Amino acid sequence: MSNIRAAFANGKAFIPFITCGDPDLETTAKAVRAAAENGADLIELGIPFSDPTAEGPVIQGANIRALAGGVTTDKIFDFVKELRRDVKIPMVFMTYANVVYSYDAERFMARCCESGIDGIILPDLPFEEKDEFSSVAKQYGVDLISLIAPTSENRIAMIAKEAEGFIYVVSSLGVTGERTEITTNIGDIVKVIRENTDVPCAVGFGISKPEQAQKMASLSDGAIVGSAIIKLLEKYGKDAPEHIGAYVREMKTAITE
């Protein structure tokens, strides 16, 4: 079983997203540890990028703050390696194809392997172009995680059949950010996924409240939350980790009840 699959082995998974270096890597490390200690099953770490096209204003702001603070991809690899001394749950990167491409895909995946990163999510990488990265990722034991969106329709089965690690189900059209309600028929999407693969799937984009997480996790294998956590970092800065810990605990409890 891959490390990522293990995150879904004990019931519904709660997956927080944290941008590396917002406001600094020391705070990111504390936030990751607080999340892990309070029930997070897998953590998505954002590598900041100057043009994060899939992100709404909240996560865009985190990218800007992190880059302004001097975070680089190299620093993030070193940081993850350090985290891995005591953080045992799976961790995946979420970033953009250009970040990997400009770093050199093979060098990037080799460093993921070396630092203990289990997978990578590239929201701007079309399924049809994934081969450019998937073969080198596989070589280094890094799962290239597929996204399935409401617009995927007749491509859902095709994407699901080739999926690895877990499948990121995008709940809504548009960019990341909190939403008052999620109107997409997630159940229908998950049904097609289940018919084509046993790879677990978790729902993200728009989830911020316990009842939303509970509903999405009841339809899938887990819930992913980003913007609500980034808002805590924006509001509390270096004091955010304890608030993130409490939030993760509340969300994890909601999806396991």
Image (cartoon, rainbow, N blue to C red):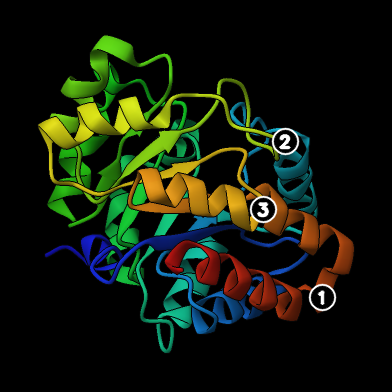
Q: Which residue is drawn at 70% across and 43% down?
A: 59
Spatial distance from mark 1 to mark 2, Cα to Cα?
Answer: 28 Å
Residue 229: x and y in percent read: 69, 58
Q: Quadrant of residue 235?
A: bottom right
Which residue position is annotated with label 1? 238
- Do labels 2 and 3 touch, CB within 8 Å? no
Judge the density around disc 1: few (<14), some (14-19), many (≥20) Cα neighbours within 10 Å: some
Tally the marks: 3
Q: Is residue 26 visible?
A: no
**Amino acid type indicated by mark 2:** Thr
Across and down, in percent, residue 186 comes to 41, 31
**How many neighbours does mark 3 have within 10 angstroms: few (below 14), some (14-19), or many (20 or more)?**
some
Q: Which amino acid does label 1 sit on?
A: Lys
Which one is in front in this view, the residue at disc 1 or the one at disc 3? 3
Q: Determine contact: label 1, label 2, CB under 8 Å.
A: no
Q: State the residue position of label 2.
A: 180
Q: Quick one: SS at disc 1?
A: helix
As drawn, the residue found furthest toward the bottom would be: 86
Q: In this rendered view, identify the residue nearer to me: 82 or 155.
A: 155
Q: Between disc 1 and disc 2, whose residue precedes?
A: 2
Please tell me whether residue 102 is drawn above or below residue 4 in the rendered image: above
* Label 1–label 3 contact, CB within 8 A: no
Residue that carries the numbered disc 3 in the rendered image: 209
Residue 182 point in image, percent of width and height: 59, 31
Q: Residue at x 17, y 21 (%)?
A: 158
Question: Is 80 rendered above or below residue 206?
Answer: below
